Amino acid sequence: MTSPPEETLTLRRDGLELSARRFGSPENPLVLLLHGFPDTPHSWDGLVPLLLDAGYQVLAPWLRGYTPGSAARSARYDLLAVSDDIAAWHDELGAPPTHLVGHDWGAFAAMVLAKQQQRQWLSLTLLAIPPFGGGFAARSLPLLPRQTLMSSYIPVMQSGASPRLLVREDAAFVRRLWRRWSPGWQFTDTEFAPTARVFTDPMMAWAATRYYRSLFTVHRRTTRDFLRVLLAPQSPLPTLAVAGLRDGCMSATLQRVLSERAGAAHAQLPDCGHFLHAEQPAAVAEHLLPHLRAASPA
């Protein structure tokens, strides 16, 4: 498959140089593709041509800290900062009609934006992450012990030794996470290479782990603000949640329960893991494109 033409954009804010990949005509409705951990915008490569063929333009930003120009000891690495970055990208492009699509950390950032600035967006799509907020779902209680086990990597990422762990042996730990979280995906060295470039760089590996440290620093106002937004009632935006049934990071059953609790549309892909959009972009597009069309202006 021939790669579609792309443009690399840069945006300076908070003393950082942020980067993004842009595809398609600026006259078309915009789809914002937000990646997660441990990942890069290149995991969207299979989905981008399908979105372009359907008449959309695409912006796929790098999370702050995942490029050399955005990794600095003085910067914040938390999901409120990322959501502010995404809002700044949207303004930079002239605030066109826009759909939010997020995976992993990107899904959390998309949820924050959908709750804080709901009038600016057309729809919300969450990949491998359920919608959070609006009260406790009692049906999720029996699922929490297994999810706790699946999330056991989080304390590791919060430790001071985590950056050294990530860069060791050409990002071997990250490669193992990919295999564990998407057990049926036979990804190639070429597919892993963009992620390896991030997680063999000590400064970028440090920045990526700060996201995890920021989750539980409740003595900081930014952490409390993020948790307040995350646990707030659901956004009224049309919302779709898609999970891979073989996801080794987030329980697909928990995603279904929380999606039903939130009144969101949901789908499960039987032969996919955590990186479902990279594993089977066509299968993801089968659910995503009708969702985008239904939420687009006439």
Image (spheres, rainbow, N blue to C red):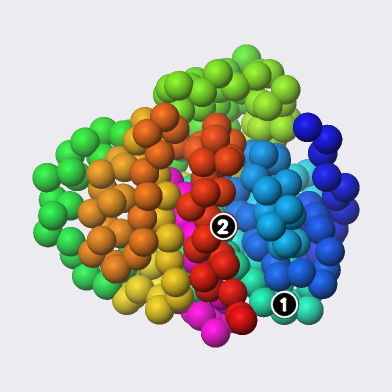
- Going by the numbered disc 2, the residue's amino acid type is Leu
Task: Mark 2 or mark 1: name the one nearer the start of the chain.
Answer: 1
- Circle 1 sits in a helix, a strand or a loop, which is it? loop
Is residue 118 depicted above or below 205 in this figure? below
Q: Which image quadrant: the C terminus?
A: bottom right
Work out whether residue 258 or residue 132 is closer to the camera in this orientation and state it.
258
Farthest residue to the bottom: give it.
119
Task: Write the start and end of the magenta stretch as one range.
Answer: 115-130
* Quarter of the image where one finds residue 273: top left
Work out whether residue 76 or residue 198 is closer to the camera in this orientation and state it.
198
Which numbered disc covers residue 96? Answer: 1
Work out whether residue 166 or residue 102 is closer to the camera in this orientation and state it.
102
**Where residue 290 sits: x, y (%)?**
52, 60
Farthest residue to the top: give it.
169
**Where residue 56 sits: x, y (%)?**
72, 62
Q: In the image, is residue 129 part of the stretch drawn in magenta?
A: yes
- Going by the numbered disc 1, the residue's amino acid type is Pro
Q: Name the residue located 67 percent from the left edge and 77 percent from the top edge.
A: 97
Q: Name the residue located 72 percent from the left edge and 22 percent from the top edge.
A: 190
Q: How many marks?
A: 2
**Which residue is the site of mark 2?**
289
Mark 2 vs mark 1, CA separation in Å:
18 Å
Is residue 287 depicted above or below 293 in this figure? above
Left or right: residue 168 versus residue 147 is right
- Circle 2 sits in a helix, a strand or a loop, which is it? helix
Q: Name the residue located 34 percent from the left edge and 65 percent from the top edge.
A: 264
**Front tag of 2 and 1:** 2
**Where residue 30 sits: x, y (%)?**
70, 67
Left or right: residue 90 versus residue 254 is right
Q: In the image, is residue 215 part of the stretch drawn in magenta?
A: no
Query: Does residue 194 appear anywhere in the picture?
Result: yes
